[in-house]
Amino acid sequence: MDALEALAILALSAVLSAVAFRRGLLTKDGAAAAFVSACIIGLCGSIWWLLAYLVFPAVAFAATMIDIGKKEEKGLQEGKKGERSALNILGVGLAPAAIALVNLTDSTFGGGDTADLLACAFISAVAVSMADTVSSEIGVLDDKVWMITTMKRTEPGINGGISRLGLLSSLIAVFIYAFIAWFFVFGDFDLLFLIPAVCGMIGNLLDSVVGAVLENKGLISKYGNNCVTAFAGGAVGFLIYFAAA
């Protein structure tokens, strides 16, 4: 990586984090966490990894603002006005940042032999967060919600609840995301983009299961759930790409 690319990554990370904070999309600590995670992803991966990652918060914030008034009336919004804190950022950003760090280690000491595997794992991890966020933000607007473990009707916004609107929205979002991110990171169009797309949906459903089984019992926080399922999605993406390539 040359100095110009590194400076571009730092500048982009700083500007976007500051803008998100100024617009009330991130808290102060959330903006700091977003800056750090974006820098790690960009500097340890590439500026294309960073751009692929940034598609996620752009869509996530847009989904958050959809019918935000109705969400606030029901108390289903994130934070006070839909803003994200450092814990939110760590929940979705820790896995891709960790994969980027492994990528740097591999390229520096291992010859970059697993570069494509790690790139697929990276996109898959972000795809999980994309699917989960869109499913949650859009799904809470659907009054018909079922608990994933029992398929009995439940209230919107509850951990483990799934809806047709949420699942359909997340399915569309994650396939579009995987297609775009794959092009950014790999520089071509390939049906292998279906790997992170599928991993995103698997991770989204796993997030609901963990929410129903563990989160509702206080055994894991929603941030921990987000982090664990993102890592799981990345690991599955890594293994599927290894088997397919």
Image (cartoon, helix red, strand yellow):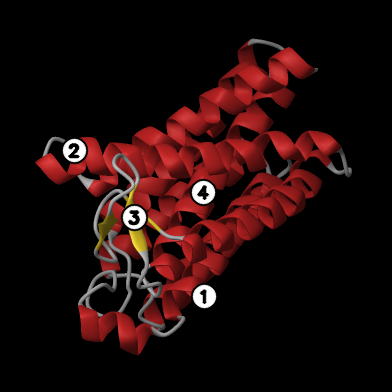
Residue 146 circle label: 3
Name the residue tied to disc 4: 39
Name the residue tied to disc 1: 62
Picture coordinates of residue 94, whole percent (x, y): 40, 40
Q: As displayed, is residue 72 above or below residue 117?
A: below
Q: Is residue 7 visible?
A: no
Q: Is residue 112 or residue 144 the one in the foreground?
A: 144
What distance separates the C-alpha of mark 2 from that of mark 4?
Answer: 28 Å
Q: As displayed, is residue 23 above or below residue 226?
A: below
Q: As displayed, is residue 122 above or below residue 4?
A: above
Name the residue tied to disc 2: 220
Q: Is residue 41 or residue 205 the one in the foreground?
A: 205
Whether pointer 1 and pointer 3 mark residues with C-beta atoms closer than 8 Å, the reply is no
The crowding category of the residue bearing disc 3, from other C-alpha atoms within 10 Å (few below 14, some 14 to 19, many at least 20), is some
Does dot 3 land on a helix, a strand or a loop? Answer: strand
Picture coordinates of residue 201, whole percent (x, y): 55, 43
Q: Nearer the viewer, mark 4 or mark 3?
A: 3
Residue type, label 4: Cys
